[in-house]
Image (tube, grey):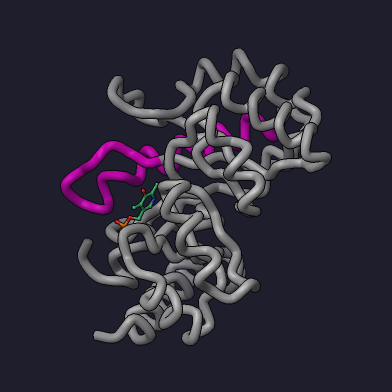
Amino acid sequence: MSIASQLEEVRAQISAAEARAGRPQGSVQLLAVSKTFPAADVAQAYAAGQRLFGENRLQEAQEKKPALPGDCVWHLIGPLQRNKVRKALELGVALIEAVDSLKLAQAISRIAGELERTADILLEVNIDAEASKHGFAPDELRREWDELVALPHLRIQGLMCIPAPVDTPEGARPAFAALRGLAEELRARGPLPLPTLSMGMSHDYPIAIEEGATLVRVGSAIFGRR
Ligand SMILES: *Cc1c(COP(=O)(O)O)cnc(C)c1O
């Protein structure tokens, strides 16, 4: 199947999941995760109307972004080292999705300030507390919340998660529900509206949408196997 037809299929699935969940059509954004795929593949998705792309390595984003039209919007979805923050901001990444510690958030705020900018970020949550993974533990996020929201050059747009691998898409539902619950709790605590919930990948994005995702990160279902 062509990238254009796979993209069309994913859009149809998103639309069906929005309808099942009683959510407005168009309330979920599709991030096409192009990591490991060449710029020529991204160009095919672009030709089919896709504008929002995700890369998980800064270096790959640095190579691909200049090769694509300037109206593409890029998210960085992988871990970011503090010594690469300046490069990420200079590249013009629209959203840094995987901010996984207070230290990293502080570094982004400081460097954004130096560049006279405000950086849009998501906080990655280790929602099912896998010891091996990145992200704030929920209690850590609660504890550090006041410090995070006080950082002057950040716009914290919401939360993201990568749940532990499970056998069936349905198996990820509790993790998605937990991330939504945590976002609701932090919204109630204030002062941020936290509009974005980034959750769901190729195998489970319809479930994530049913549980409140506003941004799904879909790679292989669009571009094929890596
Ligand atoms: C690769 C990746 C995705 C997309 O995964 P697929 O299974 O190919 O859809 C989503 N999120 C992150 C953080 C990734 O690294």
Q: Position of residue 147 (x, y in %)?
A: 71, 17
Query: Residue visible at 65% across and 53% down?
Result: 92
Q: Is residue 57 above or below residue 36?
A: above
Query: Residue visible at 20% across and 51% down?
Result: 168
Dominant SS type (magenta): helix
Query: Residue visible at 41% across and 47% down?
Result: 57
Q: Position of residue 171 (x, y in %)?
A: 26, 45
Magenta-tinted stretch: 162-188
Residue sitting at the far top: 143
Q: Position of residue 71 (x, y in %)?
A: 64, 73
Report whether 224 appears left or right of 152: left
Q: Name the quadrant containing residue 223.
A: bottom left
The quarter of the image holding the N terminus is bottom left
User: For this rendering, which residue is in front, 185 or 141?
Assistant: 141
Q: Position of residue 219 (x, y in %)?
A: 35, 62
Residue 200 is one of the magenta-drawn residues? no
Query: Residue visible at 30% across and 20% down?
Result: 131
